[in-house]
Image (spheres, rainbow, N blue to C red):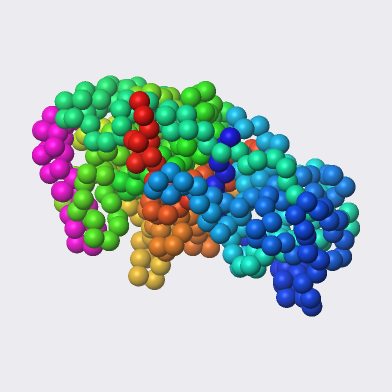
Amino acid sequence: MRRIGFRRTFKLVSLLAWLRALLAHWGFGWGHHLRIGESYRLSDSKLRVPLEAGPIEITLGANAKKLHLYPEKRLNTRGEMVVTGNFVIIDPFTDPKLIDGFLRLTPKSWLSLGRADTNQQALFRYPSLVEDEHLVVLHSGDALVFRNLADSGAAVGPAFRELRWVPENRYRRLREIFGRPIDTLPADEALILLQKINALMRDESYRPHDDRGMPGGLLQLPGQLTPIIVADLHAQLDNLLTVLSQNAFLDQLQEGSAALIILGDAVHCEIDGRLREMAGSLVMMDFIFRLKLRFPRQVFYLRGNHDSFSAEMTKDGVPQGVLWAEELLKQRGPAYLSAMRDYYERLPYVVASTDFVACHAAPPLTKVSVDTLVQIFRHSELIGELIDNRPRRPDRPQGYTRRHVKHFRRSLQLDKTAPLIVGHTPIDDENTLWLDSAGIANHHVLYSANPTQVGVFTRVGGTMVPLVYPVDPLQAIVNRLPD
């Protein structure tokens, strides 16, 4: 059974839906109450359901679409399932072998179910009988409130299908990929692994060669490969393991139908008080290299500004670039340090497909072409822009704007609505992704190192959608599994 655990963020579909939601929440009386085992047809009335009522089946229209609503659960450090206080809404009839999605409902929030939201339409494939704004679901903190908005009505009742949960064998596959309990590799084994990776990088898939005969700076991902995009993992291995254990991501990597894209900065912990720690960076890169060796045409790493030994790579005054070099020299020796430097020099900087473009930090400030990106070794100033720039602000006049995003899409012959996904610039400490960031439509910031939740972008139903999963302590759980 597959565990569902990502967050879906929605805009307010319209002012009308917002007003209707307020009426549903704050209207006179509480409406009808649903008893366990009872189904209720909604017309003009609203329905209040206790949080402990159990799994709920939602029917939109006259059996036009059925959805299931479950309490969200996660694993604690002992491997036990605990409720989070949130609820998730899924399509219970989705093929579990395919990458799919769901909606998350948090306390004191609401969702408007219907065809008006394009991402929701991609997730649930609503038939035409479902209206643009069909049903509002609210989490009042102590109950769930349902309010019908559609002439065709809706129904709410008990769900009799269990929520799919991640099987233990998916954790075993992660351990098997690493070849042992997931921890820092011995120095000699780590060097051999990195040398194999560098050999692969000399002819990495989907990268046109530059004039030197080396793979260039652009990764051209085929449209038939479903992207699984994470950014700025910053030594949080549990975040990467959580992503790989969710949805059908690992299954699709193994089948060759998906590609994991890491937008740089997998190293250097950013948690306060731990900026000097490098052990987590070592095991993170060891695991990424194991993934790359297992899935050479399915795992790709783009360069970020932290993927460096430069003395200029500092965080709050801590010289993380220098400390990273010193740690590699101490733990792995000069040959490994040199091999890691070679690895960084062989990385791409931009990934583009038929419906998205992504890089670590920013679009270029000047117009570029596909050939410019391929021949990026000739354009050092372009490298700096891609890995270390940020949106323009009054105190950052050199930053990028909506115009630069537009030109970047056009240079890659992408539609004007194609998402540009970047990392590097988290907006706050609470979240893991920010949609339409800096007021730029289809410009999204992703930061996958939040220790409580991990963001990821993927394609569902032909649409790029953002997902968020609660982070589980999987390194410890995987390592406790018996051989």
Is-magenta flag for residue 149?
A: no
x then y, percent, for residue 328: 16, 39
Q: Residue at x 78, y 51 (%)?
A: 37
398, 134: nearer the viewer: 134
142, 24: nearer the viewer: 142
x then y, percent, for residue 286: 28, 33
* Depicted 327 relative to depicted 374: above or below: below
Q: Residue at x 79, y 78 (%)?
A: 28
| Residue 52 location, quadrant | bottom right
Task: Pick the quarter of the image with the N terminus.
Answer: top right
Main SS of residues in magenta: helix
In the image: residue 63, left or right of residue 121: right
Q: Residue furthest bottom?
A: 28
x then y, percent, for residue 276: 19, 53
First to last magenta residue range: 312-339
Q: Residue at x 84, y 44 (%)?
A: 63
Residue 172 seen in the current view: yes
481, 91: nearer the viewer: 481
| Residue 436 location, quadrant | bottom right
